[in-house]
Amino acid sequence: MILACLDMEGVLLPEIWINVALKTGVEELKLTTRDISDYDQLMKRRIEILHENKIDMKLIQSVIATLDPLEGATDFLNKLNEDFQVIILSDTFYQFAMPLMKKLGYPTLFCHDLIIDEQGYISNYKLRIADSKRKAVQRMKEINFKTIATGDSYNDTTMLSEADRGILFQPPQNVIDEFPQFPVTREYDELLAAFHQAAKELA
């Protein structure tokens, strides 16, 4: 059995921070790992912006409650599960993601945790482990699983490099330009076909 390791936001679900930006009108919250490769720098700035604009967890969770999987994502995930064991490796947080996992049928998710203060604001975040996506794939390989990974952003590229095969899905042009070694897919049917082709190559 081959493991399919998927990023969450941008592959299966909308970008949570972008939707918070749209709800609040705070444009700088639209920045994601598609734009900034340093995740710690990005998260620290996000937390500052939330406090500056008095955006608490209650408001963020109200935005998350309105989100649905990307069109075609649930069907893609169901088809992928027929031939692969699927793990979602994400740099999101359980406090954000769990309501959305219900809409995807509760797939296995590895991600991080937020620290919420007494006033209900995000005060910090706790990584499961640094470079968690790559290290998760590395550990799966150590117990003799073959791995195929897909993502769309800078923070997915170490995971894609570590996997036996890496595939980009709807990435921005800057990521395509900087990581030309990875094939690019645009539609779920194309991505599913790329997984099956990679599996044949690894057989």
Image: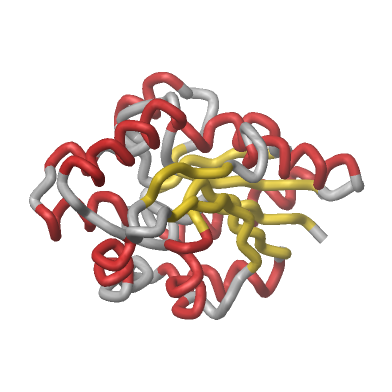
Left or right of 147? Residue 123 is: left
Q: Position of residue 198 (x, y in %)?
A: 67, 47
Instruction: Pick out the residue farthest to the left.
Output: 25
Q: Quadrant of the N terminus?
A: bottom right
Q: Nearer the viewer, residue 56 or 23?
A: 56
Instruction: Pick out the residue farthest to the top.
Output: 178
Give the answer, above or below, for where 6 lies relative to 78. above
Q: How many marks?
A: 0
- For the rendered model, the colour scheme is secondary structure
Give the answer, above or below, for where 132 lies relative to 99. above
Q: Which residue lies at the image location 49% right of the left edge and 44% below the top edge?
A: 125
Which quadrant of the structure image shows residue 165? top right
Which quadrant of the structure image shows residue 4? bottom right
Q: Nearer the viewer, residue 83 or 136?
A: 136
Q: Position of residue 7 (x, y in %)?
A: 52, 50
Q: Position of residue 55 (x, y in %)?
A: 22, 54
Give the answer, above or below, for where 35 lies relative to 86. above
Q: Which residue lies at the image location 61% right of the left edge and 71% below the top edge?
A: 107
Which quadrant of the structure image shows residue 134? top right
Instruction: Pick out the residue farthest to the front.
Output: 118
Q: Nearer the viewer, residue 56 or 71?
A: 56
Q: Position of residue 34 (x, y in %)?
A: 35, 35
Q: Which residue lies at the image location 60% right of the left edge and 67% below the top edge?
A: 80
Is any atom of residue 194 visible in this view? no
Left or right of 155? Residue 2 is: right
Q: Which residue lies at the image location 33% right of the left edge and 40% below the top edge?
A: 47
Is any atom of residue 52 visible in this view? yes
